[in-house]
Amino acid sequence: MHHDDSWGPLPPRPAFSLLIRFVLTVLLLPLWWALLVVLFLCFIAFALVAEIFTIIPGFEKGFLSLIDKFGDNVAVWPAWCVTLPELRHEGDAAFYRARVDQRIASWTSKELAAQKAKKAPPPGPHDIPVRAYRGVGAGYVVEAARAQGWELSHDHPSDPLRMVRLRRLPVAA
C-alpha cells in the first residue's frame, strides 16, 4: 500500500516532554480558546460595520474568503496540545486503534442513516488528525477506512504526519 515510513506508527514521545506539554495545555488552552472567541467576535463586529462596504465590487467575496482561510488555518485543538488520554496512552497501539475504529464507525453510521433516509450525507471533509492515530500510523487509518467503504480524499491530499482526509466511496444504486 504505502511504502513511505511516514504512514507507519510515530515513535512514542518522551514521558517528560509529554508531561510538560500536558501542563502547558492545561494552562494555555483556555487562553487559546478565549482568544479564538475574541477574534470571532471581532470578525462579527467588523462584518456589521463593513456592511457599508458591500457596495464595493468584490468586497463581500474577499471578506468571506478571509473568514474561510481563518477557519481552515486555526485549530480548536492545536498540534502542541496533549490531552490526558494521550498522556496516559502514549505508545499504546490498541488505544489508538480503538480511537480510529470508533471515529470511522461513527462516520459510516451517519452516512448509512442519511442514505437510508434518502437525505444528503453529512458534509465533509472527514479528517482524522494525527492525535487520533499516532500509535498505529496513517496506514492503519487507510486500511480501517477501506474496510468500511472509505478511501483517501483526492480533492484534498492527506499529510500522514498531520492528518488523513477521507471520502466515502460512491454507493451503487
Image (spheres, rainbow, N blue to C red):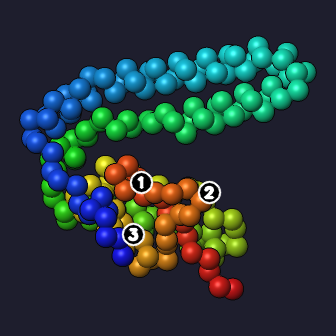
Picture quarter containing residue 31? top left
- Residue under label 1, please give it: 159
- Residue under label 2, please give it: 123
Q: Earlier in the sequence, mark 2 or mark 1?
A: 2
Tag 1's secondary structure? loop
Percent x, y for residue 140?
A: 31, 69
Q: Quadrant of the N terminus?
A: bottom left
Percent x, y for residue 6?
A: 30, 58
Question: Comparing marks 2 and 3, which lies closer to the viewer?
Answer: 3
Is the residue under label 3 in contact with that under label 1 (CB below 8 Å)? no
| Mark 2: amino acid | Pro
How far apart in space, not on screen, are marks 1 and 3 (Cα)?
12 Å
| Mark 3: amino acid | Val
Above/below status of 39 relative to 128: above
How far apart in space, not on screen, are marks 2 and 1 (Cα)?
21 Å
Q: Quadrant of the C terminus?
A: bottom right
Percent x, y for residue 117?
A: 66, 72
Give the farthest residue toward the bottom.
173
Above/below status of 39 relative to 103: above
Above/below status of 95 relative to 15: below
Question: Comparing marks 1 and 3, which lies closer to the viewer?
Answer: 1
